[in-house]
Amino acid sequence: MPIGLIGGTGLSKLPDVELEAEVVSTRFGQVSVQRGSWAGQDIVFLARHGADEHLAPHQIPYQANISAMQELGCTHIIATNAVGAIRQDIEPGHLVLPNQFLDFTKSRPHSLFDDPKMQVVYVDVSEPYDPNLRQLIAEQAWELGLVIHQDVVYVCTEGPRFETPAEIRMFATLGGEVVGMTGVPEVVLACEVGIRYASLCIATNYAAGLSPQPVTAQEVHELMDQRRPDLLRLLEAVLLQLGA
Ligand code: HPA
């Protein structure tokens, strides 16, 4: 069974991996994916923001994307997400594995079971991110000497604007530790269809108000450019282990 990889900001291509484009038809629309083999593992790669990163966080077809992964038989998904750090000890460049989320999105579909003719599904999300997959990613990050923070609370905002410093203070008070715009509902939809899902986040900046400079998309992209080689090494190592 293939492993799904969802590449976030700064990871819309997998260089040096031979992949074939495929279009998957789902109830929610068509999805362009790439299929192939990486580190001895069948993979389905999906660029969350599109190959040229033209889709803003609130425009991403989360339902179609997860449906496509399901139709292709993916048992696991490893997704990457750029985040701003709310916790001071999570420095730009560090990797982060969330184990919980706080959902502050506003206008996104939140279920794959939204057809009135279907049964309503109330999915349990007490452990939204798969513990075994998180452990495997953490172990491989240590092997590679990469800094990775585990058991982190991810706040998802609607975007595409960055947050106000007051919002970041509120999130910190509520227990939020990193903030991003794309983690929810992706993880929830994966839970609904029983796909084991982990989000591998890269802190690209301190969240708004926590550094003297305003947050910019440029710094997010620059940091991703710097961290991409390590991120790819880590994904490759995890795939090798999953195959073993
Ligand atoms: N806020 C929201 N999303 C982000 C950030 C941020 O500071 N950095 C990268 N993605």
Image: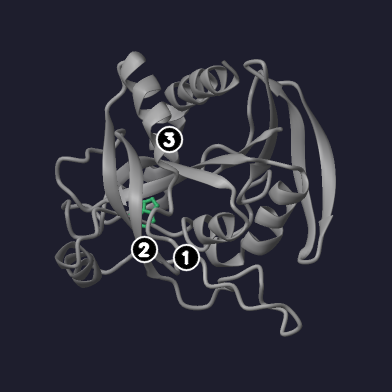
| Mark 1 residue element | loop
Q: Is residue 162 above or below residue 221?
A: below
Q: Which residue is mark 1?
A: 160
> Mark 2 CB in 8 Å range of ligand 1?
yes
* Between discs 1 and 3, the one toward the N terminus: 3
Q: Residues within 10 Å of mark 2 (few under 14, many from 20)?
A: many
Q: Is 211 placed left or right of 44 in the picture?
A: left
Badge number at residue 132: 3
Distance, label 1 to label 2, CA atoms, is: 7 Å
Q: Are marks 1 and 2 in contact (CB under 8 Å)?
A: no
Distance, label 1 to label 3, CA atoms, is: 32 Å
Mark 1: amino acid: Pro
Q: Residue at x 73, y 42 (%)?
A: 73
Expressed as whole percent of the image width and height from the top left, the position of residue 165 reads: 21, 66
* Between discs 3 and 2, the one toward the N terminus: 3
Asked whether 196 or 86 is in front, the reply is 196
Q: Is 175 placed left or right of 143 in the picture?
A: left
| Mark 3 residue element | helix
Expressed as whole percent of the image width and height from the top left, the position of residue 8 reads: 53, 45
Q: Is residue 165 above or below residue 78?
A: below
Quarter of the image with the N terminus is top right
Please state the quadrant of the image where ligand 1 appears. bottom left
Q: Which residue is mark 2?
A: 162
Mark 2: amino acid: Phe
Q: Residues within 10 Å of mark 1 (few under 14, many from 20)?
A: few
Q: Residue at x 34, y 14 (%)?
A: 143
Q: Quadrant of residue 193?
A: bottom right
Q: Residue at x 43, y 22 (%)?
A: 230
Asked whether 111 or 34 is in front, the reply is 111
Q: Is residue 175 above or below residue 211?
A: below
Question: What is the residue that sits farthest to the bottom in this orientation?
Answer: 116
